[in-house]
Amino acid sequence: QLPVIYFVTPTYPRREQIPELTRLAHTLLHVPRIHWLVANDYERCDTYMDMLLNRFGIPFTHLSSPMPHKFRSTKPAPRGVANRRAALQWIRQHNLTNGVLYFGDDDNTYDLRLFSEIRQTQRVSMFPVGLIADYAVSGPVVRDGKVVAFLDSWVAGRRWPVDMAGFAVNLAYMSLYPNVNMPYKPGYEEDLFLRSIGLHIDQIEPRGMNCTEVLVWHTQTKSKKAPIVRLEKKFLDGRSN
Ligand code: UDP
Ligand code: MN
């Protein structure tokens, strides 16, 4: 039987949330043996989100994972970190040592071939991500079937200068590292997460025709930056008058 892919999606309330999740769900609906961990940056698991996720018919878990208040005002804020930490905690709590973990944000674009590429990950697989920063791509450099270096326009002293969507991890492998961690350090989440699972460069499994194919893109939806909380407040104020 195919290993299950645990697809972790950080998401947060804003006017684009429902369309982003709908689009992503319509990708995931094509994928067999997937468990969608939807971690919402919100204080509770609201019924509306539950109903939406239920309607898609994809096996899912809905987690409430608000960003700690003290980080909300920091710039840059650690976007999606509380969410991914909650998913890691959920995986630990359920003692999952089978399957493959992938961090897939709600606004990226996924080629369906990505899922067959990552499903057989033994330890950590890596592959390029399109539309990252100045080079418009970030990914491993492969020689003779081995990862030997990384191409990324913002290396910034990182040992693993890769994007969150550019790797997948086997859960049996991850379970060997009880101190697996994703700290609140904007820009360094991938690096510190991969450091926490004792990765060696020789062990990386290159995917996507030896990292020559882009199967995931860091697309970003143009946003109006109008927080839903303010809309709710206006609505409630209007009602009380
Ligand atoms: N995110 C979140 N809370 C926030 C901002 C973002 O949970 O306050 C989520 C968002 O839904 C996405 C991930 O964190 O899945 C990364 O955020 P974003 O796409 O805004 O960052 P970028 O892709 O620009 O680095
Ligand atoms: Mn994004």
Image (cartoon, rainbow, N blue to C red):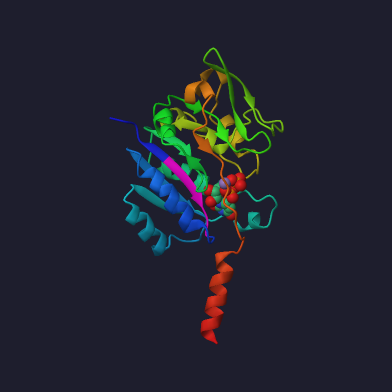
Can you give x and y, in whole percent of width and height, for residue 99 in the image?
38, 33
Name, please, the residue furthest toward the bottom. 241
Query: In the displayed structure, would residue 194 be above or below residue 75?
Result: above
Which residue occupies the foreground of this view, 6 or 43?
A: 6
The main secondary structure of the magenta stretch is strand
Q: Name the quarter where the N terminus is drawn.
A: top left
Tell me if residue 207 can be seen.
no
At horizontal 50% and vertical 57% (from top left) the residue drawn is 17
Query: In the displayed structure, would residue 226 be above or below residue 208?
Result: below
At horizontal 63% and vertical 35% (from top left) the residue drawn is 136
* Residue 228 within the segment the image draws in magenta: no
Can you give x and y, in whole percent of width and height, for residue 5 in the image?
39, 36
Name, please, the residue furthest toward the left. 1
Can you give x and y, in whole percent of width and height, for residue 87 in the image?
46, 45
> Quick check: 150 left or right of 114?
right
- Which residue range is magenta in the image? 7-13
Image quadrant where residue 161 sits: top right
